[in-house]
Image: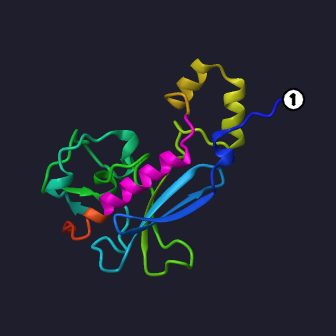
Amino acid sequence: MTTVAHPWDNEPDADAFEASELVCLMRRDHNGVWNGYAGVPKTHALYRQRRDVMIIVPEAMAGHELISTRIAVADLHGVVPRTLAAGAAAPLSVVVDVHGGLWSTGVIGEDHPNLWFYGFMCGHAWDFKPLDPITVQAYQTMDAEQAEALYRTPAEYRSYDYARVQTEALAMQIAALADVELAQEVV
């Protein structure tokens, strides 16, 4: 039996670094996929806010096309605009453009108690999950056409390098929102 080398075999399982002056963490989850996080301090407007907090879209983040695989579509209600307009109210998770959308918020571990993290994951239907037995079996037994129909596109493994670029992009966007205006809630 031949042993096949996989891209994830020589990657770390975690990393920590700084990008856009924010603490960034990367970790693999139980399916072997990368999750990336950017932490904001107490002085940041988004500290302790949920991913679906309504914000006023700043001019710098307006106009980009909304792509369903890059935003948290679950946080949209009603008609989805093609682009975001400056000054409009929108969920943070729709304004931030990152792989699979913004999926998580909160404190991570005991090492960073004064930071609130925003995160994404590379474990969606279109992503290859190297430690998920169902995904692995499906790709070993299905033909390419079946896999494409089931997963929308052939699942692709998202490497450390890919997740690092996405984590840095997340940090840059979250850092740019340090003074963002929160939309007033309608009662």
Q: Secondary structure at mark 1?
A: loop
- Residue 117 falls left or right of residue 135: left
Callout 1 crowding tier (Cα within 10 Å): few <14, some 14–19, many ≥20? few
Question: Which residue lies at the image location 21% right of the left edge and 52% below the top edge?
Answer: 61
Q: Which residues are magenta?
A: 156-174
For the N terminus, the image quarter is top right
Residue 165 x, y percent position in the rendering:
43, 50
- Residue 91: x and y in percent read 29, 57
45 within the magenta span: no
Residue picked out by circle 1: 1
The quadrant holding residue 7 is top right
Asked whether residue 149 is in view, the answer is yes
Identify which residue is drawn at 60% across, 20% down: 144
Residue at (56% x, 79% y) in the render: 110
In the image, is 154 to the left or to the right of 104?
right
Q: Which of the pair 19/100 is nearer the observer?
A: 19
SS assignment for the magenta stretch, majority: helix
